[in-house]
Image: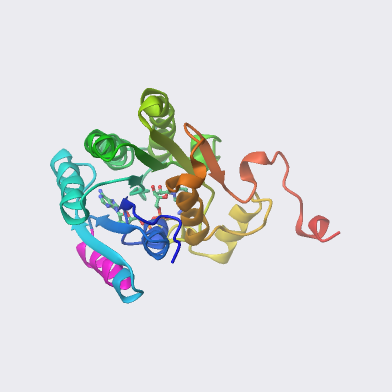
Amino acid sequence: MAGRLNGKVALITGAGSGIGRQAALRFAAEGARVAAVDVNAEAGQAVAEEVAAAGGRAVFVEADVSRGRDCAHMVARAEEEFGALHVLFNNAGISHAADADAVDTEEAVWDLTMAVNLKGVFLGCKHGVPALRRAGGGSIVNTASFVALLGAAVPQLAYTASKGGVLALTRELAVVHAREGIRVNALCPGPLRTELLMKYLDTEEKRQRRLVHIPMGRFGEAGEIADAALYLASDESSFVTGTAFTVDGGITAAYVTPEPEETSR
Ligand code: NAD
């Protein structure tokens, strides 16, 4: 069967849930062999089993992306198991419940958020780039967010700053590695109906307040982001590098969002 990722080995961090889980399933269905990485062993293992049950190939690797040793290990395991690494999807991220504005955000919350969301991407690249070089090139996809591009009135300062960092880091790496066949792109999802966001938007009123800003009037699905990651991971995007690839239901295009009755005209 002709899969869009046939012959490729893909490492996905945060593969135990949401976008990462959907990416593991889709990438494997398109022929990739997948190293499914997560700090949550139970969730990561379950996804690797799900991939296998669907006829794909995956290995679970337990790693905390904020730790250099773990990132070296996850890359080594992917190469050991599957012989090479072609796609690195730095997707793991957290959104801390006590992340607020500059006055109220504790230093510990700032440090933890930066360690996972920004340093985690740096460490993935630090250990992943040499592997991609050994494979003769490849694609790096880093999950940023629409908040890397727009300010929100409900502040999550550490999260937003970490995602802005991911975007800046992505652009620079794209330029630095362009001539060696390594593409680097940032994915900027809009608000999604995944655990990460829904644990805060836990009432219909809160959800509706957020939906007011999304031209499409709905939350995105993890699978819709995984589909964009699949494109960026595959050779179909061979001339695409350094982008902030928005998949956001139109949020970043909007100044004023239409009312539901206006959209039905
Ligand atoms: P999720 O919470 O469903 O999944 C995140 C996964 O990452 C979990 O399995 C978790 O165990 C894992 N993880 C957390 N810390 C880790 C660590 N230190 N090392 C390894 N794995 C770790 O979240 P999601 O919505 O799928 O989010 C994935 C990415 O998308 C994140 O970077 C997030 O910031 C970003 N994002 C999410 C939204 C949204 O609305 N959900 C919007 C924009 C961007």
Viewer-proximal residue among 84 and 263: 84
Residue 142, given in percent of the width and then of the height, sits at 39, 41
Say if residue 177 shows up in the picture: yes
Taking 77 as reference, is 240 above or below it?
above
Q: Residue at x 49, y 36 (%)?
A: 148
* Residue farthest to the front, as pictured: 1
In the rendered image, residue 46 lying in the magenta stretch gets the answer: yes
Locate residue 119 relative to residue 210 in the image: left or right.
Answer: left
Color theme of the render = rainbow
Over which residues does the magenta segment extend?
Answer: 40-50
The answer to which image quadrant residue 200 occupies is bottom left
Viewer-proximal residue among 162 and 84: 84
On-image quarter of the N terminus: bottom left
* Residue farthest to the right, as pictured: 265
In the rendered image, residue 63 lying in the magenta stretch gets the answer: no
Residue 165, given in percent of the width and then of the height, sits at 39, 31
Say if residue 101 shows up in the picture: no
Residue 263, given in percent of the width and then of the height, sits at 79, 56
